[in-house]
Image (cartoon, helix red, strand yellow):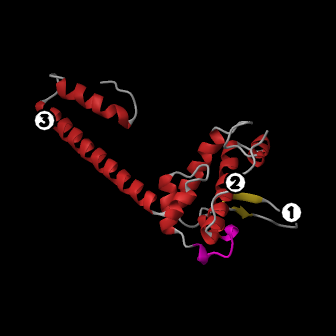
Amino acid sequence: MVAAKGTVNVIALLSVLTADSSLPAAAQAMFEQMGAHIDALNQRVRALDGELAALHKANPVSQLLAEISGIGPIGAITMALTVEPRNFASGRHFAAWLGLTPKEHSTGGKQRMGKISKAGNERLRQLLVVGATSVVRFAKPGSTSASAWLLQLLERKPRKLAAVALANKTAQIIWAMMSRGEAYRRQPVAA
């Protein structure tokens, strides 16, 4: 049996497998159980998505954070419920706590920056980096999500490095918004 990759194609594969008479009855029964289990998991995921959406709509901080490019409702509600901005002296400290700052390997007066430290909350860091990657993916001159800073960075650095730098900057913006209770002020768009 050959099937396309991805969870979207599982239901079609299971219908082909259960209809195939050359398979043993025990295997067909097993595939039917797997299909029922996948359906139950899909229903549970939809229910959890609905609960998260309701939490997001009820939380004013989450709604403020969702205005930032690269931050969706899940990232916004996770940040709003997890992060206490008073625990950090600045946005830089918050970004460092998330592990979005590079390790320093300096010697003899020569500064060398390494990979990110990956300290702190992995889930929050992952949400920020994935959101920043989506912004970087569509960053072109004239687009609404691309600031001049990001476009200049993309000219000099690889896309993944730019995404982590944008995630760092986004973390600092999140800290500033949460600590001051301000709305997001968009960066000027590159011309």
Tell me, yes or no, if residue 67 can be seen here: yes
Q: Residues within 10 Å of mark 2 (few under 14, many from 20)?
A: many
**Residue occupying the point 14% across, 22% down:** 21
- Give the SS element for disc 2: helix
| Three-letter code, disc 1 | Lys
**Residue occupying the point 60% across, 77% down:** 86
Q: Residues within 10 Å of mark 3 (few under 14, many from 20)?
A: few
Classify residue 13 by image quadrant. Answer: top left
Location of the N terminus (image quadrant): top left
Highlighted magenta segment, given as a residue range: 85-93
Describe residue 26's horizontal placement relative to residue 175 as left or right: left
On residue 165, the disc is: 2
Observer-side mark, 2 or 3, equals 2
Q: Which residue is mark 1?
A: 110
Q: What's the CA distance linking mark 2 and mark 1?
A: 21 Å
**Tag 2 and tag 3, C-beta contact below 8 Å:** no
Q: Which residue is mark 3?
A: 26
| Three-letter code, disc 2 | Ala
Q: What's the CA distance linking mark 3 and mark 1?
A: 67 Å
Location of the C terminus (image quadrant): top right
**Residue occupying the point 69% across, 72% down:** 90
**Residue occupying the point 68% across, 62% down:** 101
Instruction: Give residue 113's position: percent from left, percent from top.
Output: 76, 59
Q: Residues within 10 Å of mark 1 (few under 14, many from 20)?
A: few
| Three-letter code, disc 3 | Ala
